């Protein structure tokens, strides 16, 4: 029986009916509200979702990647390091900026070897670090990658009969110009970085200052004399050897060569410990006889392994294959004219190749005392300027004459070594250079024995 009687039961029923009616009214009003403002609610949810996704994309995006105006993928980098940006500006256009200091640097094509360009050499039998090659078309910073690391620029093969100097050249490009490093971007893994130091005017303008890192194989040779400490140049060809001229291994005023300086730009810079190395062995070519200019080539072994990086990259060596060396670039810290001394900043000068028919009469045995057999075209060549008198100088001796490697992007091919000349800076009077190709087997037997 209901505790409050019949009237109490009726009152409770009325109360329940009232609450049910109120609940029904609330539900109806909610449905009406949702129905009336459905579009507004959906729009608000979409905007909120978009804002959240945009926030997440901004903070989790791969910050190095970008896209140019044509939709091609590029890399955000300092404008001074992007040749592509210079070309765009020269065309009167505006590059795509990532921020106030960085532009989206897009490079359409970086040529890497395929097997059609390789140079087999029958005499080479070693199988250490042999390569076979694949053709890849990487962007400036974004070569194909795998989960564990980068796809190689080359595929290794234990049967490839290519010269060891050529294989080492590829190895240096892989390790120091396009090294495989952590991208520092979430989920990107390892990527190939672009550490090429070439500028838009590399190997074009001569008789002017080079830029820092533009010729990363350059070396400067030091002697005992405090008054004439630095005299000759050279080229890094491995982590233990410098290629130079044989007559640079000793100096009348400075004694024997004792040290090597690498990875710097100006002589006046403070010498860092990893820039200075001492000479432990001198390998002059066995046929070189001072004071004659024949076989003027030598190798210097350093007291310890040189620390290599993007600013200290060994050069490649010409193997005698067909190349276009009608114009070469000679680099060094030598005098810029006949009346000045060494320069503080590394210089580069573009020189023309003179034919053997032109060089022979200029360097006949009757005209040059230190060439009793005259000009020898098999081991020597001539570079100079027919019009302006641009030339290498005494301080450039031992340094390289080079061209851009015809097959490997951002690598130099040393074709010859500065040996000597008759008259500095006179138009039509080229200097004598020692060819690399005739001595390559000798170089390989010492540097990579």
Image (cartoon, grey):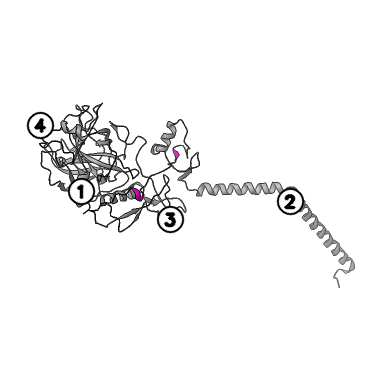
Q: Which residue is mark 4?
A: 366
Q: How many marks?
A: 4
Q: Nearer the viewer, mark 1 or mark 2?
A: 1
Q: Main secondary structure of the magenta part?
A: loop
Q: Quadrant of residue 346?
A: top left
Evaluate whether residue 218 shows in this view.
no
> Which of the two discs, 4 and 3, labels the residue nearer the N terminus?
3
Local secondary structure at mark 4: loop
Residue at 37 percent of width and 53 percent of height: 152
Label 2 and label 3: CA atoms lie apart by: 50 Å
- Residue 34, which numbered label? 2
Magenta-colored stretch includes residue 7: no
Q: Nearer the viewer, mark 2 or mark 3?
A: 3
Magenta part of the protein: which range?
Answer: 100-121
Residue at 16 percent of width and 38 percent of height: 376
Q: Nearer the viewer, residue 88 or 164?
A: 164
Local secondary structure at mark 1: helix
Label 4 and label 1: CA atoms lie apart by: 32 Å
Label 4 and label 2: CA atoms lie apart by: 107 Å
| Residue 386 percent location from the top left of the image | 24, 28
Quarter of the figure with the C terminus:
bottom left
> Which of the two discs, 1 and 3, labels the residue nearer the N terminus?
3
């Amino acid at each position: 029986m209901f505790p409050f009687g019949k009237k109490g039961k009726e009152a409770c029923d009325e109360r329940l009916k009232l609450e049910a009616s109120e609940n029904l009214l609330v539900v109806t009003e909610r449905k009406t509200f949702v129905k009336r403002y459905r579009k507004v609610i959906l729009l608000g949810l979409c905007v909120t979702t978009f804002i959240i996704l945009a926030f997440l994309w901004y903070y989790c995006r791969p910050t190095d990647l970008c896209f140019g105006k044509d939709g091609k993928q590029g890399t955000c980098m300092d404008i001074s390091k992007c040749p592509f940006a210079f070309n765009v500006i020269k065309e009167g256009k505006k590059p795509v900026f990532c921020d106030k200091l960085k532009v989206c640097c897009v490079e359409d094509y970086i040529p890497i070897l395929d097997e059609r360009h390789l140079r087999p050499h029958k005499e080479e039998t070693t199988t250490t670090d042999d390569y076979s090659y694949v053709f890849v078309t990487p962007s400036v910073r974004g070569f194909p990658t795998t989960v564990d690391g980068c796809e190689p620029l080359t595929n290794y093969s234990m049967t490839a009969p290519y010269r060891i100097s050529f294989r080492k050249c590829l190895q240096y490009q892989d390790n120091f110009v396009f090294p495989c490093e952590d991208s520092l971007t979430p989920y990107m893994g390892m990527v190939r970085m672009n550490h090429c130091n070439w500028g838009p005017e590399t190997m074009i303008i001569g008789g002017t200052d080079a830029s820092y890192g533009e010729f990363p194989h350059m070396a400067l040779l030091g002697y005992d004399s405090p008054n004439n400490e630095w005299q000759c140049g050279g080229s890094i060809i491995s982590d233990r050897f410098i290629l130079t001229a044989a007559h640079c291994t000793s100096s009348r005023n400075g004694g024997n060569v004792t040290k090597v300086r690498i990875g710097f730009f100006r002589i006046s810079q403070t010498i860092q410990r990893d820039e200075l190395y001492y000479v432990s062995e001198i390998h002059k070519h066995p046929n070189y006889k001072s004071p004659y200019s024949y076989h003027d080539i030598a190798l210097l072994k350093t007291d310890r392994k040189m620390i290599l990086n993007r600013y200290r990259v060994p050069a490649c060596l010409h193997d005698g294959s067909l190349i276009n060396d009608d114009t070469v670039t000679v680099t060094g810290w030598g005098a810029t004219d006949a009346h000045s001394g060494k320069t503080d900043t590394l210089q580069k000068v573009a020189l023309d190749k003179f034919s053997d028919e032109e060089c022979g009469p200029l360097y006949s045995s009757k005209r040059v005392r230190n060439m009793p057999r005259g000009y020898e075209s098999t081991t020597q060549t001539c570079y100079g300027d027919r019009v302006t008198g641009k030339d290498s100088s005494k301080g450039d001796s031992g340094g390289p004459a080079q061209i851009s490697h015809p097959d490997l992007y951002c690598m130099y091919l040393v074709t010859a070594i500065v040996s000597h000349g008759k008259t500095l800076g006179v138009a039509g009077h080229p200097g004598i250079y020692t060819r690399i190709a005739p001595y390559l087997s000798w170089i390989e037997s010492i540097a990579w024995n």
